[in-house]
Image (cartoon, rainbow, N blue to C red):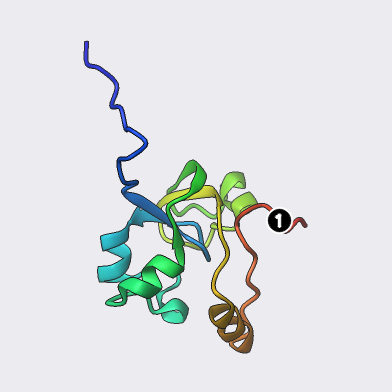
Amino acid sequence: MSQPLKRGRSAPKLNRACMLCGLVQSLSQFRNDGCPNCESVLHLGDNEDLARECTSPTFEGLVAANGSESSWVARWLRIEHFVPGLYAVRVVGKLPDEIRVDLAQQGIDYRPRDGTVQD
């Protein structure tokens, strides 16, 4: 019987969640490819500083989305129109002010994924 994987407190967390859409992937994926849902507005690709500022290593829960618009969980998390993948239920942190201003100028309503905004 195999032993469960143990991660010590000093071990780096490998995955991060996009603060705009909640997609979970590695920092190197965000840095190299950007966020497949948000790249057109966040421009994370090839910018490690921005990739770190717009993603969070601290998130709760994971949901696997298969791209189905009929999923009530996808609708609840507001990810029903996003690419299939793993999504965080909650993401700790907020986008930097300058990014939020830029989103507002583009007509994009930013809703933090940390649970502070209620419907």
Please state if 119 lies on the left or on the right of 91 as rendered: right
* Crowd tier of the residue under label 1, counting other residues whose Cα lies within 10 Å: few below 14, some 14–19, many 20 or above: few
> Where residue 114 sits: x, y (%)?
62, 54
Q: Residue at x 46, y 68 (%)?
A: 54
Instruction: Identify the element where label 1 is drawn.
Output: loop
Depth order, front residue of 95/42? 95
- Quadrant of the snapshot with the C terminus: bottom right
Count of marks overlaid on the render? 1
Residue 95 coordinates in the image, percent (x, y): 55, 70
Q: Which residue is mark 1?
A: 116
For residue 35, say whether it is visible: no
Which residue of the protein is positioned furthest toward the bottom in this rendering?
Answer: 105
Q: Is residue 90 above or below residue 33?
A: above
Residue at 40%, 54% in the rendered image = 16
Considering every residue shown, the one lying at the far right of the view is: 119
Residue at the (53%, 79%) spot, across then down:
99
Q: Residue furthest front?
A: 10
Locate residue 95 relative to residue 43 in the image: left or right: right
From the top left corner, tell me how far across and down residue 33 is, in percent: 28, 70
In the image, is residue 90 above or below residue 43? above
Residue type pointed to by label 1: Thr
Picture quadrant of residue 51: bottom left
Quarter of the rendering containing residue 96: bottom right
| In this picture, residue 57 sits left or right of residue 89 | left
**Which residue is at 72% across, 59% downward?**
117
Q: Residue furthest left?
A: 1
- Residue 41 makes an appearance in the image: yes
Q: Quadrant of the N terminus?
A: top left
**Percent x, y of residue 5:** 28, 27
Classify 10 as above or below 85.
Answer: above
